[in-house]
Structure formats: C-alpha cells, structure tokens
Amino acid sequence: MADTLQILHQSTGLKIVKNPRNRFAVITLHHTADPAKASPEWRREAAAGLTPEQAARELDIDYTAVMGSKVFPEITHNRANIVVPRDEYPTFGRHCKFWGGFDYGLRNPASFHVYTIDEGIVFSIWELYEPCPNIPAFVEKMKQCPYFPYLKYIAADPDCWSPKVSDGNPISIQEIFWRNGVRNFIKGINNQEDTWIGMMREHWGMDNPTFRIFEDCPAQIHEFESAIFVNQSERQLMTTSYRETINDKNNHSLDDCKYFFLSQPKAVTDTGWKDPEQWKRFTVPSGTRGITQQPIATSIPALRQRGYQ
C-alpha cells in the first residue's frame, strides 16, 4: 500500500521509518534505548503523578493514548476539594475583584460565569447557562447576579464582534449587548486551548486545588467532568502533528472559563507604607532629557486614592 510506513531500522528503543507521502525519515527514540532507563522500576517512578494515558503518551510515545480520554480527570479524583458545597461558600470582602466569562449561543446554551480570586484561589461562583435567542431578556438575567455591578470586565467569545445581518443592517452580538447595558465585554482569546489546559492542570495538580467551582454552577461542573479529547485517525496522524484538542461538544462553559483565564486577571495586592514620609522620596524625571529629578508633587490623599496606605 502507498501509505505503508517503510521500516529502515528497528532495535531496542530505536525505530527509523520513512513516511511514504513526503519521504521524510522519522526517528523514534524510546527510553528503553538507555539501559539505565529500561527497567520497570524506572518507568513506575517516571510515571508517578501521571494518568495512565499521559504516561503512555509521554513515556511510550503513544500519541493516541489520550484520545477519547478525560481531559480533566482531576475533577473526578479530587471532586471534594474542587467543588465547593453551599454550606462552605466563603465570604468575599470588599478587597475582592470580580470578572466574567461569556460564550454566546443562540440555539445551543450561552454560558456566563462570574469568577473571583481570594487568597490565591480562583473561584467560579455564579452561573447562567441557557440558549440566548433574546439578548435583552438574557441581559436582564445577567443583571440579577449580585456581583454584576462589580465586574471589572467580561471576557467574551471573540465571534461576538463579527457583524451579523439584522433588519438589513450588519450589527455584532457585542453591539447588541452594549445597547442593552453590558458595556464591559473584552474580546476573549480562542486559539490557545493547549495553554489553558496546562493552566487547569497546574491549578488542579495538587492536593489543595487553586481553582474551585461553587456547587451552584452545575453545568460547568458537568462539562469539566465530561470533557474528552478528540479522536484522530491513523491517516490524519501520518500527515499532521497531534494536538490535544477538546471535543467541540457541550463545552460552552469551558469556553467562557478559557476566555477568563487567558485574559490574565490580576488579584488585588495591597501596598502598605509603614513610613508616612516614604512618598516624598519617590521621584520623576524632569527636563527635556530627564537628567535631573524632582520629588513627586502629589498629596498624600491622592496617593491614598490609588490604594497606598
């Protein structure tokens, strides 16, 4: 067959084949090629902390191993520490900031979640998850969220900025939301899924996860639990590089979560000055070339308005 790989060399831990389509030689070097790493004991130690699928991919060079497998097995194994029950909800003080994530859906569900960061932990704390055929009605439900007036921004589906034809005139979904009072949309990032998956694994790859979801966000919990990787055929793998890609089905809240995390929100950091005269020692350049420096001509009350104590 024309698509059959031609084996040029094969020995313990080493395989060289020729791709019949582009005539490239592909060299696969397995850890067993090194006698010091060929033992089952070494593999068990190297696989510590990896799922069986991840270990098969990383150590056995089996790029199909994760296909169809769970993207986020951590939420199943460590659900008690990721999902926050109602009777354990923390109280967020005035120091907390709040953000939103939004994925638009007309017939499929639109997903809107509110996020905050408290003591280094990211929380998903409020959910609106339903189709959005009527944007004014959907906005009214968004405004029922107690955190809505305090949202710094809502990282939204970038397709919301694409003009659609309505009543003969091109208008974007973002513009319709703007006209109905949602004026803090920012364009979300939709082409860095692998980066976001890595971020989630960092948050959940510990005994005390740093991303937690309130029990009152059942749709988001379900999507994290059910997300699987896309399957690729052997023919596709011969001609394209394998990428971890989430199956594009029932992933609306995952998308709004991705837009939020990739917007790189920053938690509040308090700046406290113990020396009340310290503000006088801050200088700014003066003159056309900034050679000499002058003390900042700013009053203490003005500094306090910027958060300095």
Image (cartoon, helix red, strand yellow):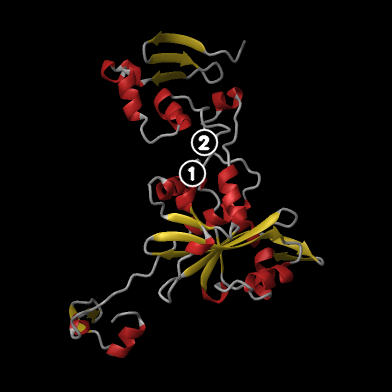
- Left or right, 132 with respect to 143, comes to right
The one nearer the camera, 114 or 41, is 41
- Residue at point 33% right, 29% down? 46
The amino acid type of the residue labelled 1 equals: Asp
**Vertical arrangement, residue 55 with respect to residue 291, above or below:** above
Q: Position of residue 106 (x, y in %)?
A: 73, 57
Lower sequence index among marks 1 and 2: 1
Rendered-image quadrant of the N terminus: top right
Total tally of numbered discs in the picture: 2
Measuring from the top left, give residue 244's x and y in whole percent.
Answer: 52, 37
- Residue 243: x and y, percent? 51, 36
Q: Position of residue 197 (x, y in %)?
A: 48, 45
The image quarter containing residue 248 is top right
Amino acid marked by disc 2? Arg
Image disc number at residue 243: 2
Residue drawn 29% across and 20% down?
37
- Please report the residue visible at 60 percent of the width from the left and 49 percent of the height from the top: 222
User: Is 197 situated above or below 27?
Assistant: below
- Is residue 236 left or right of 294 when viewed as pictured? right
Q: Residues within 10 Å of mark 2 (few under 14, many from 20)?
A: few
User: Viewed as shown, does residue 96 lie left or right of 186?
Assistant: left
| Residue in the image at 73% along x and 61% along y | 164
Task: Read off the residue under disc 1.
Answer: 194
Mark 1: few/some/many CA within 10 Å (<14, 14-19, 20+): few
Which quadrant holds the C terminus?
Answer: bottom left
Label 1, label 2: how far apart the Cα atoms are: 8 Å
- The answer to the question of whether label 1 and label 2 lie on touching residues, with beta carbons closer than 8 A, is yes
Q: Secondary structure at mark 1?
A: helix
Determine whether the residue tagged by mark 2 lies in a helix, strand or loop.
Answer: loop
Give the residue at the far right of this rendering. 167
